Amino acid sequence: MAGIIVAVFWAILVSFLAVVLVRLAQTLRATTRLVAEVTEQAVPLLADASATVRSAQTQLDKVDAIASDVQEVTSNASALSTTVASTFGGPLVKVAAFGYGVRQALGRRTAPDPEPEPEPARGRSSVRRTVIVGRTVPSARGRKRDRRNPRGQKD
């Protein structure tokens, strides 16, 4: 009787191990198929990624060349600006100062009108006008006013 029980126990154990081994074999086959499919899809993707990286490197090289050219142009423009400022800046300032001095001198030489201006007629503005060769031109400059803020202090 003990021999039969041991034989049945061994049969059950062998059956259980056979089922486990069959399932393990199926899992290994499925894993092998999955790895093969992933490899088939991954190789072209890696090739495309490699080509994209090479293209990006080429574009970066071009951008670097453009950036260095822009830097060179910027330095040349700065040098040109400095040269122009040093060459023409001083004489232009002197000419402008001379012209201002001449205008001030001529402005002081002209005597102010002793007569008060007549009241403007209705519909006309009170803007002072200057006549030049038959044309009436509005005055470009107004008189300076003493401006004070509401507290009576000068601005």
Image: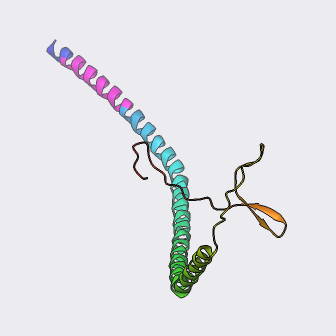
Nearest the viewer among 9 and 52 is: 52
Relative to 113, is 53 on the left or the right? left
Q: Is residue 16 magenta?
A: yes
Image coordinates for residue 106, horizontal then vertical, percent: 62, 77
Q: Is residue 18 magenta?
A: yes
Nearest the viewer among 15 and 108 is: 108
Image point (52%, 85%), residue name? 90
Image point (48%, 41%), residue name? 33
Q: Residue furthest top?
A: 1
Nearest the viewer among 143 and 33 is: 143
Relative to 116, is 87 on the left or the right? left
Image coordinates for residue 23, horizontal then vertical, percent: 38, 30
Residue range highlighted in magenta: 6-23
Image coordinates for residue 77, horizontal then vertical, percent: 55, 78
Image point (55%, 54%), residue name? 44
Magenta stretch mostly in which secondary structure? helix
